[in-house]
Amino acid sequence: MTAPPGSPRTPHMADHEADSQTRAAPYRLRRQKSEILRAQYSDVRELRICAGTWNVGSICPPTDLDIQEWLDTDEPADIYVLGFQEIIPLEVGYMIGTEDTRPVAVWEHIIHEALNKKYPHKSKFERHSDSPSPARFNPSDYVLEMDNGLLSESSNDSDGELHLLDSAKSSGSAHCLQTLDLACDVSIDNRVERKRPQYVRLISKQMVGVFLSVWVRKSLQKHIQNVRVSIVGVGTRGFIGNKGSVSVSMSIHGTHFCFVCCHLAAGEKNGDELKRNGNVEEIHRRTVFDNPVHIVGVPQRIHDHERIIWLGDLNYRLNLSYKRTHELISKQDWDGLLEKDQLKKELGKGCTFDGWAEGAISFPPTYKYEFNSEKYVSDATKSGRRTPAWCDRILSYGKGTRLLSYKRAELTFSDHRPVIAVYMADVEVFVHSKFQRALTFTNTEVDGHLLLGRKHF
């Protein structure tokens, strides 16, 4: 029987992957050559990235919803990449016509409050970058030119609302990543409380129910440039945004990052995983980051980036019966369940996510729960029985990214449990003193050659 289009083993997908690799080859070659040059005047430092995904079940949250557990705020990160699915109902009225952006404001308020909350002064709230280790990022030691800052959106398939920095809205400038004060850890009164790092929203983007919001330390903001967005709808009729992806590209210091938030095709019938594979193929094919001012070296496609994080409701299921799945959950036999996990198969060689990495899963399946309950849905529930599965996943691609933790949060607001992954990511940081030494050395060489030439003359 012939495999349908979108299967990881069809000639169609193999040809597409070959074409993608061919297109990316010149860019990667140029990048490799530039890496050798940049090593002479840059250092490698680490950033802490907290990536989270949550399908919130089409429910607008209360404004006082506490998401601290999900964001793992005990150890503040430098960047928070938060992806949501179903922030609005996935019904025809919501997919066609004016997009309902009301939940976006509520979620952004909740995120802002969680990240900028004040706590009693405790050592565990010291900023990650304050470590005495020389491998930690210290913004005051480095300089990055921001004159070519870019913020643009590639809306290839679906319409959506782009949420920029508040300061950018007031100025109307595309160069919204302006310089800010480096001091972000201020001790108001060390005997009483310590103000944690301040975070600002770098960019947010909604496509129907898919919503991606990126927040960064205020001190890091000025070292980020070339922020661009691309959205791809793969849902109804192959292009409506009830399913699909929102992707953000950016340069942090001298390193290119890409964050992809997706919601793939649902279903637990045999063969439904092939639809999800096809969705992934389409997202790769149609995600393009515009470069309207033609900045040299700026990546345009997902795999052009050096550090990539892919998160969302990937919707991959377990090839197990409802009864057997619950038996293994009751025994907390995660390895037994993972043997039948569809995504684990697609992470294999030659499959849809070949080359991608996922952390070890040591938590129960994240779907499907009764709302505001710790129980999985059963035959008795109105929505009908669903076999539990790890639908909500976070993957990474590329060198220079080290996973610190991978877990879920026990928030019962939705029928999904939110998932969080914390990474340490290498970034290349321009060092002015190294650059000056390289220039001095080059000038000395030139002067020596000129002097030698005069003697021979």
Image (cartoon, grey):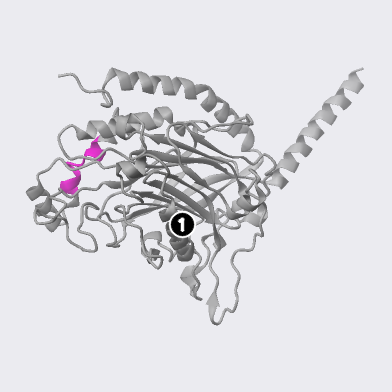
Task: Tell me where residue 156 appears, x and y as whole percent.
Answer: 46, 31
Badge 1 density bin: few <14, some 14–19, many ≥20, Cα 10 Å: few
The quadrant of the image that shows the C terminus is top right
Q: Is residue 338 magenta?
A: yes
Q: Nearer the viewer, residue 131 or 333?
A: 333
- Visible residue check, residue 331: no
Q: Is residue 45 placed above or below 304 in the rendered structure?
A: below
Label 1: which residue? 105
Q: Is residue 245 magenta?
A: no
Count of numbered badges drawn on the protein: 1
Residue at the bottom extreme? 191
Q: Residue at x 35, y 18 (%)?
A: 15
Task: Tell me where residue 444 appears, x and y as whole percent.
Answer: 81, 34
Task: Tell me where residue 308 appears, x and y as whole percent.
Answer: 44, 40
Q: Give the quarter of the image for residue 43.
A: top right
Q: Is residue 350 placed above or below 12 in the rendered structure?
A: below
Q: Please tell me whether mark 1 sits on a helix, a strand or a loop.
A: helix
The quadrant of the image that shows the N terminus is top left
Q: Residue at x 67, y 50 (%)?
A: 171
Q: Nearer the viewer, residue 148 or 370?
A: 370
Q: Residue at x 55, y 49 (%)?
A: 164
Q: Nearer the viewer, residue 368 or 381?
A: 381
Task: Tell me where residue 89 appears, x and y as whole percent.
Answer: 31, 49
Amino acid type of the residue tagged 1 in the rendering: Ala
Residue at the left extreme? 323
Q: Which residues are magenta?
A: 335-345
- Apparent side of residue 237 relative to residue 335 in the rendered image (left or right): right
- Apparent side of residue 99 relative to residue 47 in the rendered image (left or right): left
- Visible residue check, residue 398: yes
- Apparent side of residue 283 relative to residue 297 in the rendered image (left or right): left
Q: Main secondary structure of the magenta part?
A: helix
